[in-house]
Image: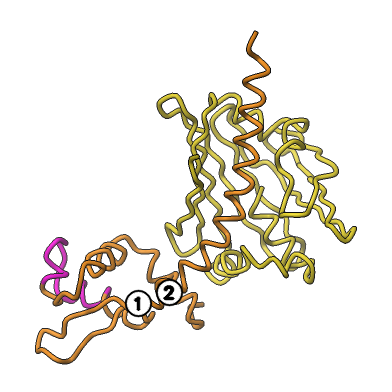
Chain colours: A yellow, B orange
C-alpha cells in the first residue's frame, strides 16, 4: 500500500502527495466529476458527503456538503482559479468574510504506470498554516467546533 | 507571526539548509565548522541558520568545548512531527478510499 506524505515546504504551504495505480485521466476524473467525488470524498471519520455541485471551469464554483454523526452539516465551497485537464486544478477555498482562505493547487502527473497526486495548499500567513496543521487530527474538534471543521475540511478538498 | 513555539519550529523547518543541518545532526553532534562544510555559505550565514534552529528549540549548543558542538533536540522535533502526522493521517484515509475506488473503477472497465 502506498502512503500519503505531508511536508511543509515553506512557511505558508502544506504539500500532500500520494501515488495511485491508475491513469492520470481517471484520477483527474475522480476529482472533477460529482458522481466520482461522492464515492470517495467522504470527509472525516463518521461523516458522509450528501451533496456535490461543481462547475469545473475557470471562474466556476463548487460546493460540497457533509453531514456529521450528530446530524450537523457543513459545506466546503470555493471558486476554480485555473482548470487544465487532466493535469492541474487551482481553487480558491472560501472561508467566509472573516478569514482569507487557502489557495489549493492540485496536480496530476504521470509517473511510471502511476499517477502522482500533489496538493499544495497556500495559506495567507504562517499562523493560519500552523493552525491548519495543528488541528489536523483533533477528533474532538469534529464534534465541538464548527469553525475548526470548516478549516480542516477545507484542507481535505 | 512566529511567537508561539509551534510556529517557530515550523518556520525553522521550512528552510532546506536547516533541514539538511538537522539531518546531519540526526547522526550525532557536530561542530559549527562540520555543519558548514557541505554548504557553500559564509560562517555568518550558517550561524544565522543555527540561531534559528536553537531558538526554535530544535538544536542545543553545548558549551563543553570551544567549538560549541550542536546536538539535535529530539523532543521538539517529534512534537512537531506529531502535529503533522495527525493531518497526514486524515489525508491518508481519504486517499486510501480514493485508491480503493480507483481499483473498483478499473476492474469494472475490464471485459
Which of these two is toward me, B27 or A67?
B27
Q: Name the residue: 23% across, 70% down.
A: B25
- On the image, the x and y values in percent for residue A114 come to 47, 28
- On the image, the x and y values in percent for residue A82 come to 61, 38
Same chain for mark 1 and mark 2? The answer is yes
- On the image, the x and y values in percent for residue A52 come to 81, 39
Asked whether residue A99 is drawn in magenta, I would say: no
How many badges with numbers are in the image?
2
Q: Are marks 1 and 2 in contact (CB under 8 Å)?
A: yes
The residue to which callout 2 is attached is: B9
Give the CA separation, mark 1 to mark 2: 7 Å
Residue A68 lies in quadrant: bottom right
- The secondary structure type at the circle numbered 1 is loop
**Number of the label disc, if any, that sits on residue B58:** 1
In primary-sequence order, the first of circles 1 and 2 is 2
Q: Is residue A25 left or right of residue B58?
A: right
Q: Name the residue: 42% across, 57% down.
A: A9
Q: Name the residue: 69% across, 33% down.
A: A32
Residue that lies at the very extreme toward the front in this rendered image: A1
Q: Where does the magenta region start and end?
A: B34-49
Asked whether residue B43 is drawn in magenta, I would say: yes
| B52 up-or-down from B90: above or below | below
Residue that lies at the very extreme toward the bottom in this rendered image: B64
Quadrant position of the C terminus of chain B in the picture: top right
Q: Is residue B55 left or right of residue A31?
A: left
Q: Is residue A31 left or right of residue A55?
A: left
Amino acid at each position: 500500500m502506498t502512503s500519503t506524505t505531508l511536508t511543509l515546504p515553506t512557511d505558508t504551504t502544506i504539500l500532500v502527495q500520494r501515488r495511485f495505480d491508475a491513469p492520470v485521466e481517471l484520477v483527474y476524473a475522480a476529482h472533477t466529476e460529482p458522481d466520482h467525488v461522492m464515492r470517495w470524498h467522504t470527509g472525516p471519520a463518521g461523516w458522509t458527503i450528501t451533496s456535490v455541485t461543481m462547475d469545473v471551469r475557470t471562474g466556476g464554483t463548487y460546493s460540497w456538503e457533509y453531514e456529521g454523526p450528530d446530524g450537523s452539516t457543513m459545506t466546503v465551497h470555493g471558486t476554480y482559479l485555473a482548470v487544465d485537464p487532466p493535469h492541474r486544478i487551482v481553487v480558491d477555498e472560501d472561508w467566509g468574510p472573516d478569514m482569507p482562505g487557502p489557495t489549493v493547487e492540485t496536480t496530476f502527473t504521470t509517473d511510471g504506470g502511476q499517477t502522482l497526486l500533489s496538493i499544495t495548499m497556500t495559506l495567507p500567513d504562517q499562523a493560519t498554516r500552523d493552525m491548519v496543521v495543528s488541528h489536523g487530527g483533533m477528533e474532538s474538534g469534529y464534534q465541538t467546533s464548527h469553525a475548526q471543521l470548516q478549516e480542516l475540511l477545507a484542507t481535505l478538498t | 507571526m512566529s511567537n508561539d513555539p509551534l510556529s517557530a519550529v515550523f518556520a525553522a523547518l521550512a528552510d532546506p539548509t536547516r533541514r539538511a543541518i538537522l539531518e546531519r545532526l540526526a547522526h550525532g553532534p557536530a561542530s559549527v565548522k562540520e555543519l558548514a562544510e557541505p554548504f557553500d555559505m559564509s560562517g555568518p550565514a550558517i550561524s544565522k541558520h543555527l540561531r534559528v534552529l536553537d531558538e526554535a528549540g530544535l538544536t542545543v549548543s553545548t558549551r563543553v568545548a570551544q567549538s560549541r558542538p550542536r546536538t539535535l533536540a529530539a523532543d521538539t522535533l517529534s512534537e512537531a512531527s506529531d502535529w503533522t502526522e495527525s493531518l497526514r493521517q486524515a489525508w491518508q484515509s481519504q486517499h486510501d478510499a480514493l485508491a480503493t475506488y480507483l481499483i473498483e473503477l478499473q476492474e469494472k472497465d475490464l471485459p
